[in-house]
Image (cartoon, rainbow, N blue to C red):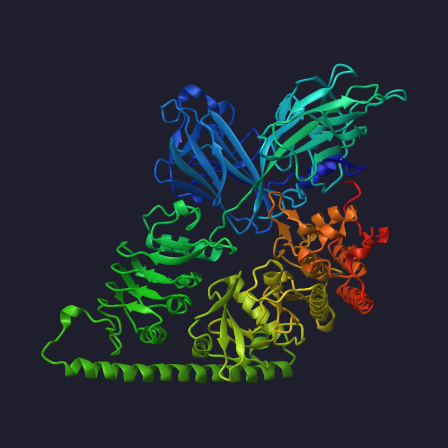
Amino acid sequence: MFVLLGVLQGLLFTAVLAQRSSTEGFISIDCGSGRNYTDSSDGLMYVADELYTSAGVNRRVSFDTNLTGIMAYYANVRSFPDGARNCYTLRPVKAGSKYRVTGEFRYGNYDGLGRPPSFDLYLGVNLWTTVEPREYNREEIVFVAGGESVQVCLVNTGSGTPFISELDLRPLPNFLYSSLVKYSQAILVREARLNFGATDQIRYPQDAYDRRWFPSNVYARISSSGNVEQKTNNEYMAPPAALQTAVTSSSVNESLKIDAYGNSSDATFVIMYFSELQQLRANQSREFDIYAGDNRVYGPVRPTYLEENVVYTDSPGFPGGLTFSLRPTLKSTLPPLINAMEILVLQQLPLLPTSEAEVEAMVGLKKLYGVSENWEGDPCTPQKFSWQGVGCSLSSSEKYATITTLNLSKSGLSGPMPLFLANLTYLTSLDMSYNNITGEIPSSVWQLPALKFLNLESNNLTGDIPPAILGRSQIGLLELRLKNNPVLCSKSSLCDTTPDTTKKNNKNIIVPVAVAISVSVLLLLVVVTFCTLKIKKAKKKHQDIDANLHTMVQRGDQNSALVKQADIIHTESHIFSPPEILRITNNFQQPIGKGGFGTVYHGRLDNGIQVAVKIVSQLSDQGEKQFRAEAQLLTRVHHKHLVSLFGYCKENLALVYEFVSLGSLSDHLLGESQYSNFLNWGLRLQIALESAQGLDYLHYGCKPPIIHRDVKASNILLNENFEAKLADFGLSRSYTHIDGRAGLSTVVAGTPGYLDPECFQTNRMTEKSDVYSFGVVLLELITGKPAISFNGNRTHISQEVKMKLERGDLHSIVDRRIQGQYDVNSAWKFIEIALACTSYNSEERPIISDVVTQLKECQSLETLSKSLGSAGTDSISTPSPHFFPTMSPSSR
């Protein structure tokens, strides 16, 4: 279907252009060039590509082509004759922000073969497109960044050597194309962007976002010098210059026909821009309908004089390749017109990248050791391009691919083992044997929680063998190989744990036995001494901090860094040592979950109480921030519907929680729970109410208030009685009134599908942001569906519920597994609450205290229904209008 966006009078063209003509965040790469320069044709700064890729060679195009008269960067290309995959890494980008990337490929017979190649182009780990064997190709995508960098990779498919002429990255405001590109798993591919009636191409600075609008004059041209007024922050905006020209058919009896590019299998979105450029007399009118083929899809359209009007395809779009026609109505005295049009294709990104922390660790290894293998792009994905010596887990149920094995044996490595190895938290096997590795074995190695095999033999390691490594080896949890390191353990007798068989002494059997016994006894003493010293050192450190803290508080020094550090240490929670964490988790034997900052393991305290232990990545800045935030918060908040913190270990960045036995709400709703219990409607109401009460405590029971920032179904845990407990406070922040407004001015954080859309415009999170996320959880509770449906269109749950609600179809909204066993009035009220919470405008959302009150009323209605013996769904009727919150902007 088509939707009309009638734009009211707003800012003048000059004001709009002045506001947005900024090159901040622009990256323009002249591929194959060795210089930086400002191009006179567009005023943009172009840079050499050596900062963005280390692969490939620079080549000049043939002098016969004379391409430099078009654009300066057509004079050269970057060619990639070696390796299957070669990549550009573009940074910095901001996770959760929207960008456009464009690549241009002007062959220019640079290799003298006279045969343009064909090759694949990837955005990160996913196939973007195939570059066709033509003289010129231009490819463009719009996407939401998932991390702090993005890679564009050229892949050799055996049909010629990949090359590129120009590559650019442009930041886009999040409101642009907001109904199409919302999540990091979807990109928008440009098929065409047409400026009807124009004589020249429009780009920067006429288009502040540097989109290319190509002229099209298939019909009679009309134009106006008047400024076409636009509404600001609209998701579909043509540049003002594109609205000053148009085409029209020669007579009122003739239709305008426009072909939409694309394939019939593509989800194609068409955006048409209209503005009346003639001042019509009283007896004149211009009115027309829009047809796709022979089907009327929208109308009538009446363009407004010198104002932008937009008609666009609503979800799920049209098949590509259709012919659209603008047909005048019987009332019209003038033929139809059109000013500009965009044709876009929505494309999914099915493959998962490796986690950013692990990628950084692998890139660090490549730089540190100068690894010569073709380590380009993502280490794990796609699997056919995984790095040599790297083994990965590619489970589709996880958010990221993970590195599980690393074999760098006989790779000519020289230098120390780096600390950033600790980022490889899923590594089970590490082989760095037969190199020239020097220095001590760092703590980052023995802290790898999943490591089962470690081979460091035949290197030049020094220092002592860490007791934790020896301990794990002796009880069979780690296969350890350290022989042929001549200086290792030179100051102790714990040296050769795996002696070379060529040094056997067959004359005396007693001596090796005696040595083995001595080593075992000494090992035990060392381990005990190590643990004792660590505990004494920790206690002394805590006592010193407490004493200094007392002095600072007495003199009013409330902002001291030491006071802030003591926020964690000076609490009622227990402080665990690293050996205690190992014992509690049985050497990290049973992982029970993974999050963005670490892995959670099942554990048991000495008194038999079950716990969950989250180990945060030691070297991740975000991980350490999460650890401190969560420890500081949970040691000062206590509520029956918030998960409890038993203690923490600062050395391991470990948090020890109460164990919540029935897993997360997400596990049950999505059918992945290992438990047989079923969530009926009464339990779902209970879980909703208890979760809201926990959130209400954070917002109004804490001083200062706390914003959770990551409310979602997987962060609501259920105990054996199905009582709900809100968990995972790593992103939570206390907040105060800032600039006269309540809220937290911050980088937007959270999970796609649950994020408050208003935050992308304001960069400010308030308690209403949590309310939005909680509203999504409520919709998941009643529908049993995820926040985003992966049905080819990536429909958000609120959109799906609203569409069904407009038909009054409660049956299709409520989870079929409830089998009609619910009170109709209770369900309608529940949906009303959920949709109010997910209102786009935060001012229209209720506060969480009101949500608690309304959910109690839902429970009362359900209880009353049961007491009266109600049949549940037998009396379903269409709800009255007051049940509907504002569904969408009136212009849609």
User: Which residue of the protein is positioned furthest toward the right in this rendering?
Assistant: 282
User: How many callouts does the rendering have?
Assistant: 0
Report the residue at 14% width, 68% height from top: 502
Q: Nearer the viewer, residue 198 or 870?
A: 870
Q: Nearer the viewer, residue 711 or 783?
A: 783
Q: Position of residue 830 (x, y in %)?
A: 76, 59
Q: Position of residue 643 (x, y in %)?
A: 62, 72
Left or right: where 786 falls relative to 836 = left
User: Which residue of the protein is positioned furthest toward the left in this rendering?
Assistant: 507
Left or right: where 819 falls relative to 560 = right
Query: Image quarter for residue 160?
Result: top left
* Residue 197 in sight from this viewpoint: no
Q: Image quadrant for the N terminus?
A: top right
| 434 over 100 or under it: above or below | below
Q: Position of residue 795 (x, y in %)?
A: 65, 46
Q: Position of residue 687 (x, y in %)?
A: 69, 67
Report the residue at 73% width, 58% height from top: 820
* Residue 543 in sight from this viewpoint: yes
Q: Image quadrant for the C terminus?
A: top right
| 474 over 49 or under it: above or below | below
Left or right: where 411 falls relative to 273 = left
